[in-house]
Amino acid sequence: MPDYEIVDVTADNLGQYDLFCQKSKAKEKGYKEKVGWFRERSKEGLKIKLLMVDEGKKDLVSRGFIEYTPAEHGWRVVDAPGYMLIHCIWVVGKHKKKGYGARLLKACIKDAEEAGKKGVTVIASDANWLPGKKIFINHGFEIVDKAPAVFDLLVKRFTPSPPSPAPSFPADWEARLKRYPKGLTILRTRQCPYTEDATGIALKTAKERNIEARAVELATSKDVQTLSPSAYGVFSIVYNGNLLSYHYLLEKDLAARLDEFGK
């Protein structure tokens, strides 16, 4: 048995493998929604590669993954026609800092080159819920744009001087926030299986505090690209025109954020 293997998950072999995030809760709504989302998005060119490692068990086990798609179908708020867009890259536990993340990234870069893309782009953050930028800079990416409050847009170009503009963020973040009514608005998608629980926590917290709240489903990549008030795109909590969070918050953490705004 090899020490590790990188496997392409497809609609055909999904029963044999997993989609990594929340795989231990495969019967719950969030994971089931991700499965349906993946089956549809794979028709648009989305790929998930699993890192399978030897832990002394009968079979290799998944301990990391990378997810990416042609940027025209991306579920991040980025304008990057002709590029491959990385959604997520993650290696967990004792397998961190062993070069597995680099192997996953190189596999994505190879796919993008073979597909004739201009390059690869990714949103990074040194805060929460997104990869840090170090791994990308170490593999020839450069920062080309920034978005509030913690997002960097990085690009690895396959030609040094492309004739077209570099990938970029929009500049209408304040206008996006103003679209949403007073109270708490949770924008969620099926791209991330954790957003189901995160939405439930936010709605429960709002109810306990007598805050008017609603959940909004961003059902397509176009919805994400045009309506999301954060670059991360697939989850946001907006309160009275302010972005409280772009990622999962425990109840106590959401309560603390609301306290900052006097509610």
Image (cartoon, helix red, strand yellow):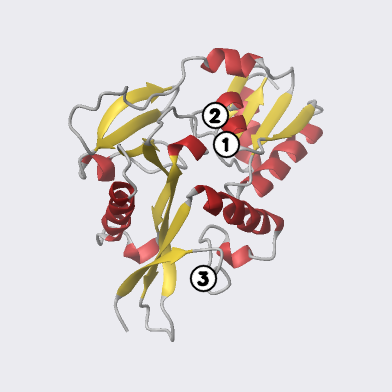
Q: Secondary structure at mark 2?
A: helix
Against 23, is 218 above or below? above
Q: Residue at x 29, y 49 (%)?
A: 109
**Residue at image mark 3:** 17
| Relative horizontal placement of residue 184, taking residue 69 as reference (left or right) | right
What percent of the width, then of the height, locates residue 139?
21, 45
Residue closer to the observer: 11 or 214 = 11
Q: Which corner quadrant holds the C terminus?
A: top right
**Residue at image mark 2:** 225
| Relative horizontal placement of residue 76, taking residue 3 as reference (left or right) | right
| Relative horizontal placement of residue 22, taking residue 29 as reference (left or right) | left
Q: Residues within 10 Å of mark 1 (few under 14, many from 20)?
A: many
**Residue at image mark 1:** 221
Q: Are marks 2 and 1 in contact (CB under 8 Å)?
A: yes
Q: Give the number of the mark in front: 3 or 1.
A: 1
Could you tell me the amino acid type at mark 3?
A: Tyr
Q: Residues within 10 Å of mark 2 (few under 14, many from 20)?
A: many
Query: Going from the N terminus, do you reach mark 3 or mark 1 first?
Result: 3
Could you tell me the amino acid type at mark 2?
A: Gln
Could you tell me the amino acid type at mark 1?
A: Ser
Q: Quadrant of residue 159?
A: top left
Q: Compute the Cα span from label 3 to label 1.
A: 25 Å
Q: Secondary structure at mark 1?
A: helix
Q: Residue at x 39, y 62 (%)?
A: 93
Can you see residue 53? yes
